[in-house]
Image (cartoon, rainbow, N blue to C red):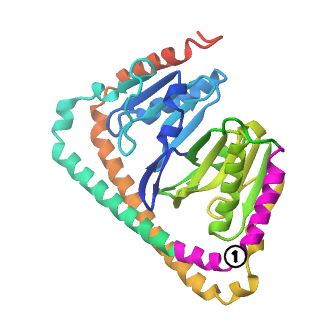
Amino acid sequence: MFAGSNTPRGFVSFFDQIVPRRDARRFIILKGGPGTGKSTLMRRLAEEGEALGLEVERFHCSSDPDSLDAVFFPRAGFAVVDGTSPHVIDPEFPGAVDEIVHLGLHWDEAGLRAHREEIAALRDEIRRAYRRAYRYLAAARTVQDEIEAVYGELLDWGRVNAMAEELAAAALPQRPPAAAPGRIRRLFAGAVTPKGPLHFLSDAAGGARRVLLITGPPGPARASLVESLVRLAAVRGWDVECFHCPFAPDRVEHAVIPGLGLAVVTSAPPHAWPGRAERVFDAGRALDAGGLGSRRRELKEAEDERSRLFSLAVAALSEARACHARLERYYVPHMDFAAVDGVAALLREKLFSSLPGVS
């Protein structure tokens, strides 16, 4: 999963949704520069937690999906997060819940200062690459809006609304409105990355006993089906995990209702569902198929242009990642990783030693 993504609006963060700070037992905020071992430390804690039988949620970095931005142990109530830009995080309850761990205490400052100009130049290159990426994503989104407008003109909203009722009947048991609505947690199952669009749908929804699929052309119909179900589930008191679309971050494309063991997944490129499903709801059934035929050339030209712009955005993200890798090469030789290993050991003791059966 991802707690943030590159989007047409820039970087969008849901880091505050990993766990409400008031509900956490411990919230560890890692600070430090590139290449200082934040991701490795979190990966090690996640592996050690799993070895102890703890459930672990891993949140990948959208700018380098092989790295981690956060790990969360839901049943234990522990989170460890990278609190550096572009998702700067500060304590809300210092000492009582939150703790800052600054890995920069273990670097050789004199060695880094000797490369001040090179580091500053690479930072400038990275900023320029991200600006290009976000402009291309915004341009691609504008073209995608035109594509979706065509499909929107051909939609029979009466059919869409009827399908929404079918989905609700299949997904939710009958239940009166709750005295208090269910909680809604917002994250990303996928992200726009230097490797292109990438998803961890199996992590987000793989634990569900029941999977309902939404298929059909892009546009408002698919989102309407998922979002109407989310609203109804919350009104009936169910907690819902909503997974937003990184290409349209205000839009929910997948929903998981843990209390029902249910996942509702939008299965379409680039995030086709790889497993079995109980039922498929095809939003394409609400389209005027006859009217679509005369618009196919228009749609194909727009899709080609969107793909071209999207590829340029991915290339810019890849350039930013390459510059970041060069930046890390200045930091790695000047880090005391033995000291960082000591920090990891202290965190392990702090997080896990108080759990039943753990020494």
Residue 277 in sight from this viewpoint: no
Q: Position of residue 157 (x, y in %)?
A: 71, 71
Q: Which residues are magenta?
A: 145-174
Q: Main secondary structure of the magenta part?
A: helix
Residue at 68%, 59% in the rendered image: 272
Instruction: Give the total number of marks visible in the rendering.
Output: 1
Tell which of 177 and 292 is nearer to you. 177
Image quadrant holding the C terminus, namely top right
Please indicate whether residue 210 sits to the left or right of residue 299 in the image: right
The answer to which quarter of the image holds residue 198 is: bottom right
Tell which of 90 and 329 is nearer to you. 90
Residue at 52%, 18% in the rendered image: 351
Q: Position of residue 180 (x, y in %)?
A: 66, 35
Residue at 75%, 65% in the rendered image: 161
34 above or below 338? below
Please indicate whether residue 120 sits to the left or right of residue 164 in the image: left
Q: Which residue is mark 1?
A: 155
Residue 172 lies in the magenta-colored region: yes
Image quadrant holding the N terminus, namely top right
1 above or below 52? below
Please indicate whether residue 142 sits to the left or right of residue 180 in the image: left
Residue 35 lies in the magenta-colored region: no
Tell which of 85 and 92 is nearer to you. 92
